[in-house]
Amino acid sequence: MKKSIKKALAFSLVLALMLGLGAVSALAEYGASETASGVEPTELSGVTATSSATTHDVSDSGELTAALSGLTDGDVINITETFTHYAFIELRDVSVELRLNGNTLTIDSPGPGGPPGVFALRLGHEWLARASLDVQGPGTLNVMRGRLEVYNQSSLSKNGGAVVNASNVELLGNSTAAISSATGNILTWGGELTVTGNVGGRVTGFGSTIVVNGNIGGGITAVRGRVTVGGDVTSTGTGVSMAWELGMGYIADPNPGVVVIRGTLTATETFISFSREAGGTVFDERTPEQYDSLVTRNGNTYRLYTSDVGSVYIRTEAPPSPAPAPPTFTQGSGAPLVITLDIDYADFYRLSRDGVYLERGENADYTARPGSTIITLFPRFLNTLPTGAQNLTAHLADGTTEPVNFTITAPTAEAPPSDPYATAPYVAAVPAPAAHNVPQTGITGRMILPLVLGLLGFALIAGTIGHRLYMKKKDQS
């Protein structure tokens, strides 16, 4: 008997040990998988990138020409003196930083007496190449005579207080540009353009996003896209021309155009025109008075001119606010009614109702005191009046009168006290916590099996030891 018990005990210990080892192994595997899946952060060794960018110190046009001939991606052009460069500049397939250091660089191309219609500064090249120019201030970059062109997803940015002025600007192919001002015209085919100052000529956008914080001196043409103007827009022709123009694949925006003018719009000829094609037959012309509605945006009121090809918002003075409701006295309330009149107290003389003067005094119908003129009507007088609108007359010292209007209402019937025992007391329902808000205990479905195995092993060990102690005690007795 004792020998069989010993065998059973040995078998139980071996089984418990195997279950415990299985649990430990499963837990270790779970921890390794969680770490691999990103539950615990993994420390990565840093990699330091090396740069082959070159800084070119430039003090005159010759040094600038030399620097441009050997530019590589990431190079810096460091302007150390103010000068004028009488030749065009074209950047392709490079990102360049231009540091002005408080100086002025003027790109004047084609130069005095040169042929018109060419570019002075071009970033990218139509659909063939792209480039990026970051102008760092303080200082000024002037692009004169020839156009400033930003093509093929290229970019022109200005930072650090840099000023970028241009004559005419052309944007093509979803490029982005930020300039300070343009003395001539702006033409964009896609892309985003920001002008922090004024534009002297006309702004034309085909599916573009254009923001001009200042004024526009030549009107707006918008074919889809969006144009926002912070100042005034003037034109000797059409103020705003909007069109739809189908079949333009380079326009990503499929929606009708939107023009927002936060200043005024003044046009010598047509105020606003809508057409199907840019430069096509106009099907709808508007005068300033022919707006569709008044709308409010961000606390400002705009006149809205709209059609199926676009909408124009022009800020206007807000319509007059409706007159405030006259003050109200409820019969039987016992509270006086206080009315402030927009009348100098020195000019106020007395009140009347239906040609009969009211008695003034603390124990009479009313009192008056400064602050323009503050009238207090007492209940002893108000309770004699019928319900509805009331009209008194304020008489002034110069013989003129002003109306004094208010309303008398009947007292409202009080609701009977509710029976506290008529309904069951209200018990607020406690919502079940959302699944994503349940506190995490750290025990997941993947951990249940190893935990159960471990508990079974420990229970078997404890049962075996207890049984052996019991048998030993029994033998001794």
Image (tube, grey):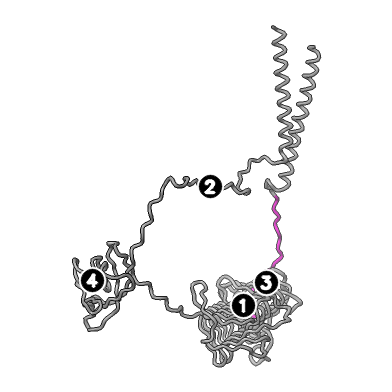
Tell me, yes or no, whether the two marked residues, 2 and 4, touch with CB atoms within 8 Å.
no
Task: Give amino acid for label 4.
Answer: Ala
Whether 329 is drawn above or below 247: the answer is: above
Dot 1: element: strand
Q: Which residues are magenta?
A: 44-61
* Residue neighbourhood size for the residue with mark 3, other residues' Cα within 10 Å, grouped as few (<14), some (14–19), many (≥20): many
Tell me, yes or no, whether the two marked residues, 2 and 3, touch with CB atoms within 8 Å.
no
Label 4 vs label 1: CA separation? 58 Å
Query: Which residue position is annotated with label 1?
Result: 226
* Residue neighbourhood size for the residue with mark 4, other residues' Cα within 10 Å, grouped as few (<14), some (14–19), many (≥20): many
Q: Earlier in the sequence, mark 4 or mark 1?
A: 1
* Residue neighbourhood size for the residue with mark 1, other residues' Cα within 10 Å, grouped as few (<14), some (14–19), many (≥20): many
Between circles 2 and 1, the one closer to the viewer is 2
Q: Earlier in the sequence, mark 3 or mark 1?
A: 3
Residue 277 x %, y %: 68, 86
Task: Give amino acid for label 3.
Answer: Val
Residue 368 is marked as 4
Query: Which residue position is annotated with label 3?
Result: 96
Residue 244 x %, y %: 67, 82
